[in-house]
Amino acid sequence: GESVGLHLPTLSVQEGDNSIINCAYSNSASDYFIWYKQESGKGPQFIIDIRSNMDKRQGQRVTVLLNKTVKHLSLQIAATQPGDSAVYFCAETHSGSRLTFGEGTQLTVNP
Amino acid sequence: NAGVMQNPRHLVRRRGQEARLRCSPMKGHSHVYWYRQLPEEGLKFMVYLQKENIIDESGMPKERFSAEFPKEGPSILRIQQVVRGDSAAYFCASSPRTEREPQHFGDGTRLSIL
């Protein structure tokens, strides 16, 4: 079946550094992608999204890059802060309904 | 502007009992989704509903599980005759009428089966 996977299960960075979290997807029909942040005991929190007709989108301290040729998605976090420590999931959909989630990357920010 | 509200936050049941999980979507949202998350795993889609209609239930087990989103009131995920394997976090998400808008999640119900 179609799946969305992440390259690294854990990522540890120093406070102030930039973080890059990667995601591979296999459904070439996917046309909408979302990054979520999940803190312990809470639900996924929307960070940023991107549609398949774009290859880059920027938010506040975050940038999402989409490479449809190799089916790759990345989340860049600038000047990472301790409050950014969480599990990050990418999710994709091709019908605008059900989301397919990756397995998650645990980001740890060291002070 | 309240977000997606789920209750209870924690639910403990014995094997064979029934579990009812409730979800109130964000104001103005008419699409509701249920997902299940096992420890240290991603969320897995279960069911997608609009008011009084089940749109996609392909991720929900055929037996013991049911979902509804009535005209009035919250969406309900019902699990009958619970087994140990049903222990998980169940998350509800909602989105506006327009598709391809981000789904916003509640903080989930942690279901524990004794």
Image (cartoon, rainbow, N blue to C red):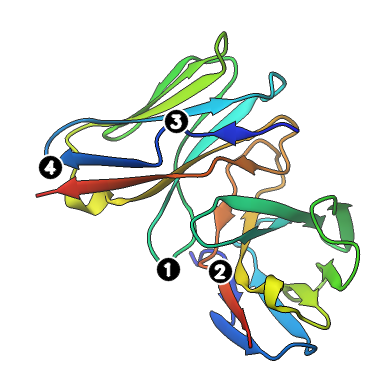
Q: Are marks 2 and 4 on the same chain?
A: no
The circle drawn on residue A15 is 4
Circle 2/circle 1 CB separation < 8 Å: no
Q: Amino acid at mark 4?
A: Glu
The circle drawn on residue A41 is 1
The circle drawn on residue A7 is 3
Q: Amino acid at mark 2?
A: Gly
Q: What is the crowding at mark 2: few (fewer than 14 residues within 10 Å), some, or many (at least 20)?
A: many
Q: Could you tell me residue A57's position as x and y percent?
A: 42, 23
Q: Are marks 4 and 3 on the same chain?
A: yes
Q: Chain of mark 1?
A: A
Element marked by disc 1: loop
Q: Are marks 3 and 2 on the same chain?
A: no
Q: Chain of mark 2?
A: B
Instruction: Using the image as rendered, state which of residue B106 and residue B81 is in the foreground.
Output: B81
Q: Chain of mark 3?
A: A
In whole angstroms, how far apart are the C-alphas of marks 2 and 4?
A: 30 Å
User: What residue is rendered at 30% in x and 45% in y?
Assistant: A107
First-in-chain label (1 vs 4): 4
Circle 1/circle 4 CB separation < 8 Å: no
Between disc 4 and disc 3, the foreground one is 3
Question: Compared to A24, does B74 lie above or below?
Answer: below
Q: Could you tell me residue B65's position as x and y percent?
A: 83, 70
